[in-house]
Amino acid sequence: MLAKLWTNFGISNVSKSFGNYPILDRIDLEFNRGSFICVLGPSGSGKSTLLDLIAGFERPTSGAIRLGLEEIRSAGPDRVVVFQDVSNALFPWLTVRENVEFGISRLPRAERQQRVARVLEMVNLANHTNKFPSELSGGMKQRVQIARGLAMEPDMLLMDEPFGALDAITRKKLQTDLKSLWEETGKTIFFVTHDIEEALLLATEIVVLSTGPGARVKEWIRRDQIPQDPATVEYVAMKTRLERALDIDEDH
Amino acid sequence: MRVLYAGLGVAIVIAVWQLMANAIAFDMLFPPPRVVGASAYDMIVSGSMTDDVGASLWRLLLALLIGVPAGILIGVAIGWWPIANAIVQPFIRMFNAIPAIALVPFSLLWLGVTEQSRIALLVYTITLTVLISTRAGVRNVSRIKLRAGECLGVRGPQALFKIVLPSCIPAIIIGIRTAIGLGVMVVVAAEMLGAESGVGYRLMQARSQFDTAALMASIIGLGLLALLLDRAFEFAVETLLPRYSTKRRIK
Amino acid sequence: MSGFRMTTLSTLSLCSFVIMWAIAAGSIGRPDLVPSPLQVVEALKGMLSSGEIVKATITSLGRVVVGYLLGGVAGVVTGIILGRITIIRESFSIIFDVAKGIPPIALVPVVIMWFGIGEMSKWLVIAYVVWVVVTISTLVGAKEVPLIRLRTAEIIGLGPLERLYRVVLPSVVPYALIGLRNAVGFAFVALVSAELIGANSGLGQIIMDSRFALQTDRMVVGIFVLGGVGAICQILFELMERLILARRFQTG
Ligand SMILES: Nc1ncnc2c1ncn2[C@@H]1O[C@H](COP(=O)(O)OP(=O)(O)OP(=O)(O)O)[C@@H](O)[C@H]1O
Ligand SMILES: [Mg+2]
């Protein structure tokens, strides 16, 4: 798959409703290629809906999402989704290796094997290639899913609360792994989460959606505004600001 | 240990049966285990058992060979295309409500006391059963799997073969298993109501000769045969399709 | 596609089937083999006004009800005993595995020899099938009463009898219901089996007699009424399940 040539990723004035029920209202955002974008928002605000729009599973009611100049119209292997519901996302009848190979079966054998080996190495699963999903723990399954996405060599990874169902220690581990993976590969990552600290640790851009119906962008915190060191006043202040933004009562 | 217990259970049943036979003391009407055993032995030695079971199994197998692929094909088609489903749905409801055995006289009327009539009814039963199970399997394929496929460049007809079909294999397996059980019931019914060979035919022969021992031996034999078929199918699935086994669980 | 359009399509498909049937019947011109829809309706009218079909339906339904109740109660009791007492289960489950495979129709000749051609034979064949089906599924439920529940009962200090009907029985309900629901269908299979071979009344006899009399129209009526009654019983059972039991007794 040839990497498409684009340098910026724009969500311009996007609204989405299901029937007459408005979910997203004029979302307007723009990011550079290689950004790590974290989206926060109250439950039901429309984070997953936004992700589905970027993935191409759904079309906006109005507005457009573009990679460079090209509008997103359908799902494609340049934007791979890592689903939260990992037990449904993996194919239970395929081994770890076969799951990872699923999308690249047309590549020549040698290249395919090389790629599979590389991505499984990246997610530390090189020793589990012949297991079936039912024989893996939750964290391992999630890593298989990430590896399967990386094998496609996509421009963008779309992740919907990928670590939401994991225990705290596994989550911590996968967060640092994902961060170094991002640093290594320079992929653009669109990451939905409920966890403010997770967002602060990972993101170069943080977006907070307001409570629906008709959710809007409530906060958009840019790269240079995100404090890196948790032991600083700035960090605590930013955390408080995000907590406030997420507080549903504040809206009324 | 398990075998021991099972042996105990069988021994108890035989003992109770013997006691009842003693109390009734009318071997012609209620033969004791020994007489039924002798009758079964006769059937085995004379080769009539092999002939009967062979005839019935042959019918069942032939019908499975036609009915299973047909059921899968139709089941996938109507599970995948809502329009096809809407067209076929009322007929599935209707025929599913009618016990296949009630259609035996119908098939005899149309096709006569022929091999075609029995096979046709069996094929019908098996197709319907497999189809219903397959359709449910296709419909229950999680949307996430299909979406994951889209992200990985697998869509349309390719998704049907690489995602939908493998996803519903467990449902298809259950469907076939149910179909085998029902198939045994239907083939016996069809043979009892009109045939010149098979286990069902043997049952009717025994009935007209008031041969209770042969009747009871055949009944027990049928139970064993159905159990054997079920276990054989389970074993075949476990060995041929280990990927779809429901027995593998997280360790 | 909307539900309304689906229903329309289904209705259209049924109508076109009836029309095709009428055309086929007309062009074949053998009403003894392929009666037209109109002839079937005529036959139904005749059988209704003579009271014949109503009488047969009541007779058949009565048999199913009696056999089903006998077999159902016996099945639940047997299932609980087998499920709770390991030695008995280990010893007799093989017997039930064999019994499950016996086609009900195979029992009819011997049962008639023992109990004559009267109602008792029909009740027994139906009850037998229902008994086996219900026993097997109740057994699973009784065997797998969650240990926590039994421990809870122990901690509260319930005696064995109280434990049985306040903990075991309610835990078994969802499983017994699965068996009882499947048994409705099997009861009708058994009913037809008993009525096709040596019956002097009931829907099965109408079907069988019309075969020899070459009255296909009457046979079709018999088959449809049988299917209709079976479907109604099925629906009633599910309704009862949903209304009375759905919220309190969920599986899982
Ligand atoms: N297919 C659909 N049809 C109708 N409404 C929908 C559909 N999908 C989502 N919604 C509605 O859109 C709103 C936003 O849903 P979404 O799943 O995007 O929220 P979310 O922010 O991801 O929530 P959570 O944090 O709980 O995952 C909800 O009110 C939901 O009911
Ligand atoms: Mg969500």
Image: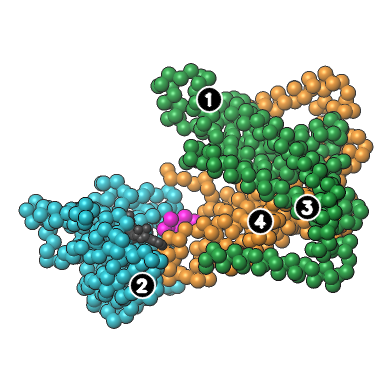
Residue under label 2: A61
Residue under label 3: C223
The residue lying furthest to the left in this view is A233
- Name the kind of residue labelled 3 in the image: Ile
Badge number at residue B93: 4
Look at the numbered discs 4 and 3 and tell me whether their residues touch, using CB distance below 8 Å: no
User: Where on the picture, by quarter, is residue B48?
Assistant: top right
Q: Give x and y (percent) for residue C27.
A: 84, 72
Residue under label 1: C165
Residue at x 18% of width, y 63% of height: A219
Looking at the rendered structure, the secondary structure element under dot 1 is helix
Residue segment shown in magenta: A88-93
A153 relative position to C208: left or right: left
Question: Is A91 contained in the magenta span?
Answer: yes
Q: What color is chain A drawn in?
A: cyan
- Name the kind of residue labelled 2 in the image: Thr
Please, which chain is the residue tagged with disc 4 on? B
Letter of the chain shown orange in the rendering = B
B57 relative position to C116: left or right: left
Crowd band around label 1 with a 10 angstrom C-alpha radius: few (<14), some (14–19), many (20+): few
Looking at the rendered structure, the secondary structure element under dot 2 is loop
Question: Is B238 contained in the magenta span?
Answer: no
Q: CA distance from mark 2 to mark 3?
A: 52 Å
Residue at x 63% of width, y 65% of height: C10
Badge number at residue C188: none
Q: Give x and y (percent) for residue C141.
A: 54, 34
Q: CA distance from mark 4 to mark 1?
A: 38 Å
Looking at the rendered structure, the secondary structure element under dot 4 is helix
Q: CA distance from mark 2 to mark 1?
A: 57 Å
- Name the kind of residue labelled 4 in the image: Arg
Residue at x 31% of width, y 70% of height: A15
